Amino acid sequence: MASITEIPPGKNRTVLVVVAHADDPTLFLGGTVARWADSGWRVVVVRATDDRWDSWNLDEASTTAQNKQQFDKAMGILGVSHIVELGWPTDSLGDASELVIREQIIRQIRTHRPHTLVTFDPCSQFAEDNEDHKMIARATDEAFWTSQFDKHHPEHFNEGLAPHGCFERWYFGRAVGEVTDVVDISTTLSRKIEAACTHQTMLVNYAHQLKLQASTGGYDVPLLEEVLQSGNVQPLMEPLLRAGASRTGEHYGLGAAEEFRVTRFGGLGVWLDRFGVTRTD
């Protein structure tokens, strides 16, 4: 049974969000990211790819630069404290080494020492059709475990890093394996939409993809033509995001919400409540 989860005060805690593409944090969980930031958490976002090919009718160098600029602006709107760029070519992670990517994520876990680790749900494979997403899901899930071991990448320790265990893992996706936690984003939905519409370059490309699909099916969509001609993605994205958040919220008596699968203390929360003693620091 899913429960409505309150975002507690940050108390010097860090949440590390690992994504594949620049628009992933806003589209999948922008309202929750903003709530973490508003509650005093230090939010760090790791972007694995450079999105160099995610545009329409624009050269590669301009695409990379514009997507980076828009990503930085969107993260600022959500209140993200720090951005890490891994720099992989977009839409290529399916052929990359999972061990190499995992090492890079382990390094970020040991560097930022998060309380909460967030990424795509590796258990939502049937709803996920993006190989970059799948790779980041698997590599981050493994990094959660291996970042705690003292024999995985001991070269990190020569840099002053140390093993680190995240307390909880939050998974998001097009459809997570099992919804356990729901976050009310009624107060941050407008910022999510503002941040999402900042990704103009990527979302114009999305509009063009929709146009191609509609055309193949025998449809013309005047709204998509307007977006492609004006470059203004708000008329397309705002209704989609509001409807999605509202539809999710309705299931839980909320105005707008985002869903997650959350695992705390490796699923041994009951054991921890019995034997653990809460520190006062």
Image (cartoon, helix red, strand yellow):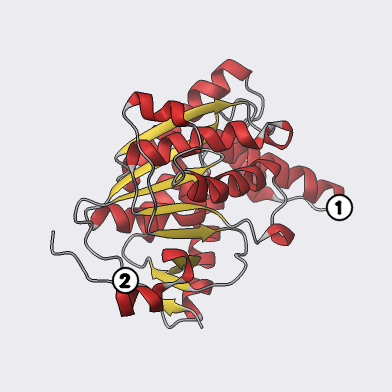
Q: x and y percent of residue 269 in the render? A: 40, 73
| Type of the residue with mark 2 | Glu
The residue identified by callout 1 is 218
Tell me if residue 207 can be seen.
yes
* Mark 2 nearby-residue class (10 Å; few <14, some 14–19, many ≥20): few
Q: x and y percent of residue 82 in the render? A: 33, 36
| Type of the residue with mark 1 | Gly
Identify the residue shown where x is 46% and y is 58%: 169
Q: x and y percent of residue 88 in the render? A: 59, 27
Return the residue nearer the eye: 140 or 228: 140
**For residue 203, which numbered disc appears in the image?**
none
Q: CA distance from mark 2 to mark 1?
A: 46 Å
Tell me if residue 69 can be seen.
no
* Mark 1 nearby-residue class (10 Å; few <14, some 14–19, many ≥20): few
The secondary element bearing badge 2 is classed as loop
Report which quarter residue 135 is drawn in: top right
Nearest to the eye among marks 2 and 1: give it.
2
The residue identified by callout 2 is 6
On screen, residue 167 versus residue 245, left or right, reads left
Return the residue nearer the eye: 59 or 227: 59
